Amino acid sequence: MSLSLIANWKLNGSKEFNHHWALEFFRNFNGNNYSSIGIAPASLYIDHLKAVLADHDIMVGSQNIDMEQTGARTGEISASMIKDLGCAFSIVGHSERRILFHETNHMICQKLIQANNNSLIPILCIGESADENQRNNTYKVLEEQIIEALGNANELSSLIIAYEPVWAIGSGKTPNPEEINSVHEMIKDVVQSRFPKIDLESVLYGGSVNLKNASYLFEQKNIDGALIGGASLDGREFALIANVLKEQSV
Ligand code: 13P
């Protein structure tokens, strides 16, 4: 099973947080396949978190990577540095990066290439705004994001896409599970038909996933897992969501 449940801790965490989270997670997770679970802490804490997770092969990744390998780019962190720390993946093109840090599809494309060149699985985030959703432009916007972001990155040895409607992130609102399922089907069709040299491993959903809605989401055929923000900060809740996914995947 590939990476199917990823915690995006965003700008949260500390060494104390890592210890407490791990304690709560391992107390409540009843599976033994850790490699389908990923955590993206702030990059500064990757090393510490890996030490805290010790022998459990939970995947650790970054929330972002730079579009260049090296250079005069103060404050940036490259894919090769993330790989050097033993990470397996990186989130790329999260809507918060697109909106707050003005990342374009062109920059995201460069980042996908960097991830691929350094054997990191890129988790490409796409999603429509509330306005685009209300105007029934969801499919058009997502298709554009996929085609532009994958434009020059059309030979990736692995790729995971996370569908995260911008209006669903941190809002407590989600599209209904059937709608998400249809969107995921469209995403798989677009990638498979237009980018035959990309190995799309799975399509995850992100945006207000929690323990209450997890089972409704995971019962959909094309929802392969989730990328979780708020609810992933609680090691217990994240473990219980992982239990739900494990039970529904058998
Ligand atoms: P929430 O789960 O807090 O809505 O965040 C989703 C997200 O942005 C994950 O990348």
Image (cartoon, rainbow, N blue to C red):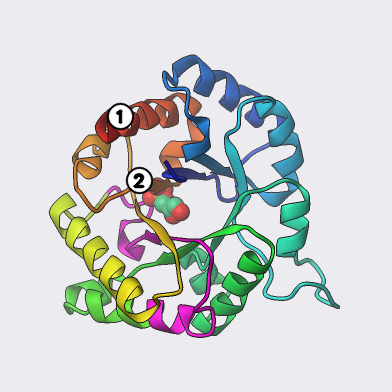
- Across and down, in percent, residue 126 comes to 39, 68
Report if residue 193 lies within the magenta region: no
Residue at the disc numbered 2: 225
The answer to whether the residue bearing label 1 lies less than 8 angstroms from the nearest atom of ligand 1 is no
Height in image: 26 above or below 237?
Answer: above
Q: Can residue 167 be seen?
A: yes
On the image, the x and y values in percent for residue 101 come to 58, 73
Depth order, front residue of 58/157? 157
The stretch in magenta equals: 145-172
Side (left or right) of 210 relative to 186: right
Give the labeled residue for mark 1: 244
Marks 1 and 2, the one that precedes in the sequence: 2
Q: Position of residue 142 (x, y in %)?
A: 32, 75
Q: Residue at x 70, y 35 (%)?
A: 50
Q: Which residue corresponds to the image point at 36% horizontal and 64% vertical from the top-left?
A: 166
Determine the residue positioned at 22% across, 72% down: 133
What amino acid type should be assigned to the residue bearing mark 2?
Gly
Name the amino acid type tagged 1: Val
Which residue is found at the position 53% from the left and 78% from the top? 153
Q: Secondary structure at mark 2?
A: loop
